[in-house]
Image (cartoon, grey):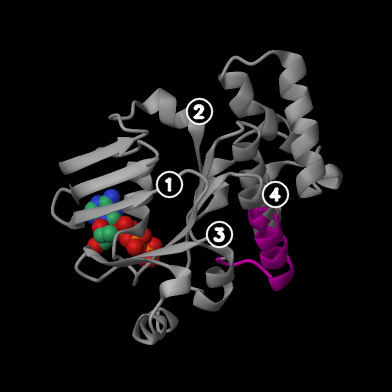
Amino acid sequence: MMFEFDCVSYQYADTVGLDEVSFTIDAGDAVAIMGPNGSGKSTLFKLMCGLLKPTAGTYTYQHATPDFDQLRQTVGFVFQNSDVQLFNETVTDELAFGPLQLGLPEATVQQRVADVIDLLGLASLANRVPYQLSGGEQKLVALGSVLTMNPQTIILDEPFNGLAISYQNRLIDLLNTLHAHGKTIIMSSHDFAKTVPMVDRIVTLNENHQLDFATETSALTVAQEELLNRL
Ligand SMILES: Nc1ncnc2c1ncn2[C@@H]1O[C@H](COP(=O)(O)OP(=O)(O)OP(=O)(O)O)[C@@H](O)[C@H]1O
């Protein structure tokens, strides 16, 4: 078990974010977190990558209470709004920032940046200012800046939001490739048709911020599919 949530709640100052949620995710899984607006998906992701701590219940990562440094190196998070994640002067600097922060040798960093530029087809953008890129380009650069850290798990909050179909398809191909190479992929999405072929499991939250159901995609019932199609 890689991620284990046991009766986890998160209470904001005056709002419930999550209410007694329990589920697990194994290494190498591709999982969709689905649910209506405000059900708690982003809160769940922030707990998973250590930006928040449960206010009740226990969250373990590889069987231990995670510390932030460990999560920073092993769990990459692509935010819903990529622009909040991009702050360097060039795309190349943006891609190099994470591994440099980890203290990796310069040659290793350059190799990782070159590999990710190749993988994501970012060569023509390498010297551009990330802040001035289109939404789709920014999403790819944000994903790239996570990939250069070489995380075991990649979490993406609504990765298709605001992307043209061509960029959505590129992202799908990339995530499928990363999954095939053994990465754990966890994403939220409102697009059931697009998401289902990409994932092994679906975890659903409801409007009360509780777990509705968690199931293998191959075992989804007709009623569950109808519910997810209405999100
Ligand atoms: N910083 C915050 N302060 C107070 N309440 C918050 C905060 N962030 C989220 N909430 C509340 O917590 C609940 C869960 O929000 P969250 O953003 O996790 O939902 P979500 O499923 O990601 O929603 P969406 O699909 O709209 O992105 C909501 O009721 C929301 O209003």
Mark 3 or 2, which is nearer the eye?
2
Residue 205 x %, y %? 29, 66
Mark 2 or 1, which is nearer the eye?
1
Q: Residue furthest front?
A: 219
Rounded to the nearest angstrom, the CA distance separating label 3 from label 2 is 21 Å
Ligand 1 within 8 A of label 3's CB? no
Counting other residues with Cα less than 10 Å from the Cα at mark 1, is it few (<14), some (14-19), or many (20 or more)? few
- 177 to 96, vertically: above or below: below
The quadrant holding residue 219 is: bottom left
The mark that comes first in sequence, 4 or 1, is 1
Q: Residue at x 75, y 31 (%)?
A: 113
Q: Secondary structure at mark 2?
A: helix
- Tell me the number on the disc at residue 26: 1
Say which residue label 4 marks: 132
The quadrant holding residue 64 is: top left
Task: Please give left or right for residue 215 compared with residue 115 in the image.
Answer: left
The mark that comes first in sequence, 3 or 1, is 1
Q: Is residue 55 visible?
A: no
